[in-house]
Each structure stands twice: as structure tokens, then as C-alpha cells.
Image (cartoon, grey):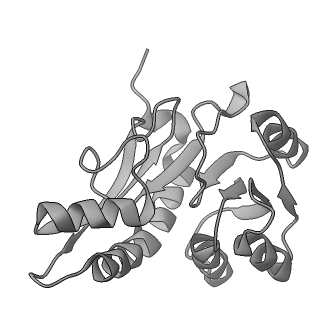
Amino acid sequence: MRLGVLLSGSGRTLDNFHERIKAGTMAGEIVVVISNTADALGLTKAKNYGYPAFVAKGNDAINALIDEYKVDLVLLAGFLKLYEPPARLKRAVLNIHPSLIPSFCGAGMYGMKVHRAVHARGVKVSGCTVHFANEIYDEGPIVVQKCVALAEGDAPGAIAAKVFAAECEAYPEAVNLVAARGVDSFWPSL
């Protein structure tokens, strides 16, 4: 599979993908990395890894690059905009969310906002969800979920660290499942 990675920030998830692909534990090859922010550290990392890396504002500009690089599967890796793929990839966009969907998700719920809400609610278990993205935040079919136990004194930063460790396992697992089973196997029959 030809993978396109969309990111907005530091590229920690890109680091994980790169290491897993290099180790042979994640299917596919990264053929392009795109950010909607020019100062994203993830772009620098992508260039250092040898991936074509671009800044693109808006879906049309992003999709032109996605088509140019013949991407089969789009991986949202901390991409903080609602992405609308080209028609041929409408069902081939994966996202990772730092909670167990349907809890602590939806528009405006990302990153530390999620972990602060988890902390404030006092839940005992959190985790992450890899799901297919559609036109509504965090609504597409779920591929993989990983749970993490929370301790009484876990602050939002500690929760974030535990969840990110789970994300590093869950996202490559989800990509491998999609590679093995195909995109369509995760979507309800029409």
C-alpha cells in the first residue's frame, strides 16, 4: 500500500510509522507527507527520513498531492482539520483518536483537550481508537481500540503518555489489518 501521511504538528506518529515500516512490522510505504502548517516539525522529520514533504492549505491542494503520489491509504497523524479526500479514497482515510470512541470525541476534542476531559471526569480506563474517517469527526468505522488503565493520581500529562504508548501499537496494527483485509471489509454493506 502506498501511504500518504497528513499531519499538523511534531510528527511523533510519523516517527512511529517510519520505525515500524523500517523494522518490517507495519505494512506499506510512505510515499508523501503533507502538512497544513508550514512550521510543523513533522515536515522536517519527513524530509530527514527522505519522504517527499509538502505544505498544502485546503482539501484541493492536499488532494492534488495525494493523486500525484498515487496514495492508496491516507493516514491522519495529528492532522487538525476535517479532511475531505478525493472520491476514490472516500473510504480509505484512517485516523487515530486519543480516547475510546464514543467517549471524549467529536469536533474540538483532540490532544490534551481529551486528556484534560478524561482527568476531570475521573475515568479509570482510557485509551485510543483507530477508525476510518468520514465527514463527521470521529464517526467512521472503528478498526482497533486499545485500553490503558489510569491510576488515581494520573495528571493529564501522564494520561497522554500512557495513551500515546497505546497509539504506537494500535495505529500500525490497524494499518496491517487494512492491508490484510482491504478497506471495504470495515465499512457496512450498502
Above or below for 82 versus 156: above
Judging depth in this view, the residue of 116 and 146 nearest the camera is 116
Above or below for 77 versus 108: below
Does residue 34 appear to the left or right of 116 in the view shown?
right
Does residue 173 appear to the left or right of 153 in the view shown?
right
Spot the residue most to the top.
Answer: 190
User: Which quadrant is home to the N terminus?
Assistant: bottom right
Q: Residue at x 77, y 69 (%)?
A: 39
Judging depth in this view, the residue of 151 and 51 nearest the camera is 151
Q: Residue at x 41, y 20 (%)?
A: 189
Judging depth in this view, the residue of 173 and 139 nearest the camera is 139
Which quadrant of the view contains residue 111? bottom left
Return the x and y of residue 106 as percentages of the image width and height: 38, 41
Return the x and y of residue 136 as percentages of the image width and height: 46, 31
Return the x and y of residue 32 as percentages of the image width and height: 81, 59
Which quadrant of the view contains residue 38? bottom right
Above or below for 53 versus 185: below
Q: Residue at x 52, y 60 (%)?
A: 176
Return the x and y of residue 122 as percentages of the image width and height: 11, 66
User: Which quadrant is home to the C terminus?
Assistant: top left
Which quadrant of the view contains residue 88? top right
Does residue 67 appear to the left or right of 20 in the view shown?
right
Q: Residue at x 20, y 68 (%)?
A: 119
Number of disc labels: 0
